[in-house]
Image (cartoon, helix red, strand yellow):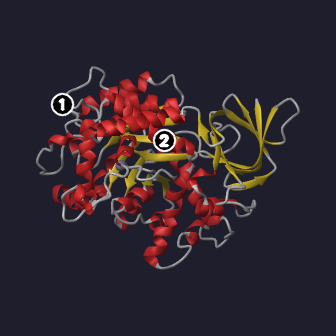
Amino acid sequence: MNAYIPDMVVSGGKVLSGAAVIVHEGRVSAIGNPSASVVATRLPSQAILPGMVNAHSHAFQRTLRGRTHWRGSTGATRDDFWSWRHQMYEVASRLTPESIFAASRMAFLEMALSGITSVGEFHYIHRDTRGLKYGDPNEMARQIIRAAREVGLRIALLRVVYARAGYNAPEDPRQKRFFDSDPGEALGATRILAASTREDRAVTVGLAPHSVRAVPLDWLTTLAPEAKKNGWVVHMHVGEQAAEVEACLAEYKKRPVELIAPLLLNDKFTAVHAIQSSPEEMELIAKAGANVCACPTTERDLGDGTFPADQFLTRKVSVALGSDSHATIDLFEEARELELNLRLAQRARNVLAQRCDGGEGVASIASLAQALWQCATSAGARSLGVEGGDIVVGAPADFFSVDLAHPSIAGATAEDLLPTVVFGAARNVVRGVWVGGEAIVKNGQHAKQAEIIAAFSKTQKSLWP
Ligand SMILES: [Zn+2]
């Protein structure tokens, strides 16, 4: 049993002053005064916050950082998501089990250092560089899980299903590593992975039909009941690009969410991006209690568009966050972008504030930040179907501490701690990170930091000769 005694604790969206967080066997056993028999760790001039949940990651895309920010990189006259994808495919075609491990470990290290304690990895590189099956169908998935566990993060491995390039689209040989021959192959691999990781409570498995572009309706008809039977969460890219909606209308005469609603929409489903959703599609998502996952820093990097957080929060949809392509890894930034992008678009301030007061007009200085904070924490846990996202009795002891003397948040009080952190914190305010009560980051450093960075730097040289 251990007691952590910071100046402030964020619990249930509220800030408690002078409370201790008592941890027993990896869980929060009490919040309050530590008894004399408990080992006390004082955290002066620090606040403890719930670990953040990164609900959408493609860890290997950390290798693309810095490589795609010039027009000549694609040869296209106009750069957008589709020309960026050429470069992403290029690096995906070169990855080995060793290099995907090194790249994932780097991405997960950066997550841990920034206060993230759980990640949902949307994983689609299943086959070897020739497009043939590995001896172990989950070879690459296991490398990613190993990377997360070595860093100390919890991971939900969302095993992607990929069937085709698209409706009436010619085969793209660069996608050969993603394909399953049939839905049974994907389901079989997912079942094996789930069974073999059951022992580790920090690892869960979900199913991720890539998108309506890459997975046709007859496959979804097979996959949906199996996901339900196995209790898997289901994640899917939905409406990231207008072209995807147009292709779906051409193939099925329905928009993506309309198409999948009868099969997939429920509280274990997450629509990733959902930028192109029509009001009717948003209603369907809300009615089903399904989740959406916004990835604002990737969406801005790729020029996807602005996530309509106001539309979804008005409908009381749970909005999770993901760092997706890892153009940057900073969930504070993802959270604040939900609001700040709308300010730019609507030329107004506190756009989401009204949506956060439950329509009752009971606003406080912290209500908007509380709502955004929920997106970075408990909404992510809901989306991944895992515990966590808050510091409450019985929850896993997943949390991090911030330095209250850090220049970016200095002067914060219990009243304005959350808005100060959400709207102003630099990523390096993080001092300590605990997962299941184990410290994985101490004094802003991870024990394996130097080794992980050195291995990744070497990997980058081999991937980009
Ligand atoms: Zn994605």
Front-most of 402 and 289? 402
Is residue 390 found left or right of 242 in the rendered image? right
Residue 206 in view in this figure? no
Q: Position of residue 258 (x, y in %)?
A: 30, 57
Q: In which quadrant will I find the N terminus?
A: top right
Q: Residue at x 82, y 50 (%)?
A: 18
Secondary structure under tag 1 reads loop
Residue extending farthest to the right is 36
Say which amino acid is labelled 2: Val
How far apart marks 1 and 2 lie (CA) works out to: 29 Å
Is residue 225 found left or right of 383 in the rendered image? left
Secondary structure under tag 2 reads strand
Instruction: Please give the residue where the numbered disc 1 appears in the rendered image.
Output: 130
Instruction: Please give the residue where the numbered disc 2 appears in the rendered image.
Output: 119
User: In this picture, is 228 found above or below 256?
Assistant: above
Q: Position of residue 176 (x, y in %)?
A: 19, 37
Which image quarter: residue 101?
A: top left
Q: Residue at x 86, y 35 (%)?
A: 35
Q: Position of residue 5 (x, y in %)?
A: 78, 43
The local crowd at label 2, few if under 14, some if 14 to 19, many if 20 or more residues have their Cα within 10 Å, is many
Say which amino acid is labelled 1: Arg
Q: In which quadrant will I find the C terminus?
A: top left
Q: Residue at x 36, y 27 (%)?
A: 191
User: In this picture, is 140 found above or below 346?
Assistant: above
Q: Position of residue 300 (x, y in %)?
A: 39, 62
User: In this picture, is 25 found above or below 70?
Assistant: above
The local crowd at label 1, few if under 14, some if 14 to 19, many if 20 or more residues have their Cα within 10 Å, is few
